[in-house]
């Protein structure tokens, strides 16, 4: 059973996440942002993982939620035995395109290239996408590269979350035994 449960803390804010890597794509999310809830639901559906996540109100709730989801993901992977480890996906949404490549290497790192036109998408401040992904990477011990472009900010963000979901599904797929590392440990 590849399940994880964690609490994320970022400054004064707390969030909780429960994750099942072998789920069916169900999500129950309460982030404080309808748009972020929509994005995390899209992530769960494309990754085919079940996700329950909730953030307490506060200025840093987005980062706390990223940390909680990352920690739950890390717990669900255990020592990472039998997973593919690497994943990548390109997802178009009309005029927008996102490319995501990731490695469950044990080394948290984020590289992100792309710009948003506005400051908000609905009730979500777009400048919080990068801190959310950084917190996710640290919690999950994940190296993540994200590149996106397009005209519509909603399409750009959604293509990022969906590409992340497809890449996560690919990287966490069971395909062997042992830890996928030349060192024997991640």
Image (cartoon, rainbow, N blue to C red):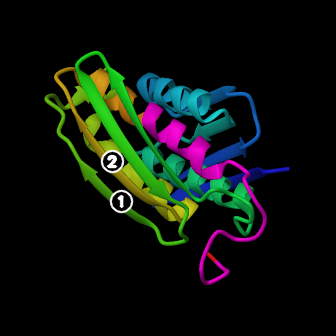
Q: CA distance from mark 2 to mark 1?
A: 8 Å
| Secondary structure category for the residue under label 2 | strand
Query: Is residue 183 inside the magenta stretch?
Result: yes
x, y percent for residue 81: 74, 65
Quadrant of the image for the C terminus? bottom right
Place residue 22 in its image quadrant: top right
**Can residue 103 be seen in this snapshot?**
yes
Query: Is residue 76 inside the magenta stretch?
Result: no
What residue is shown with label 1?
110
Residue at screen point 22% across, 19% down: 95
Residue at screen point 57% across, 30% down: 46
Q: Nearer the viewer, residue 9 or 108?
A: 108
What residue is shown with label 2?
146
- Residue 43 disc label: none
**Which residues lie in the magenta part?**
162-185
14 up-or-down from 180: above or below = above
Residue at screen point 44% across, 44% down: 62
């Amino acid at each position: 059973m590849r399940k994880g449960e964690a609490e994320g803390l970022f400054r004064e804010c707390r969030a909780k996440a429960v994750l099942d890597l072998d789920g069916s794509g169900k999500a129950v999310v309460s982030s404080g942002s309808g748009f972020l809830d929509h994005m995390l639901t899209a992530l769960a559906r494309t990754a085919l993982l079940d996700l329950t996540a909730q953030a307490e109100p506060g200025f840093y709730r987005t980062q706390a939620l990223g940390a909680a989801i990352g920690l739950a993901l890390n717990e669900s992977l255990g020592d990472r035995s039998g997973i593919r480890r690497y994943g990548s996906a390109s997802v178009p949404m009309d005029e927008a395109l996102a490319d995501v490549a990731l490695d469950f290497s044990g080394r948290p790192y984020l590289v992100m290239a792309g710009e948003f036109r506005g400051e908000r998408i609905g009730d979500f401040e777009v400048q919080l996408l990068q801190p959310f992904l950084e917190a996710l990477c640290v919690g999950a011990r994940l190296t993540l590269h994200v590149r996106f472009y397009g005209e519509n900010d909603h399409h750009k963000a959604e293509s990022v979350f969906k590409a992340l979901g497809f890449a996560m599904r690919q990287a966490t797929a069971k395909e062997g035994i042992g830890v996928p590392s030349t060192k024997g440990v991640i």
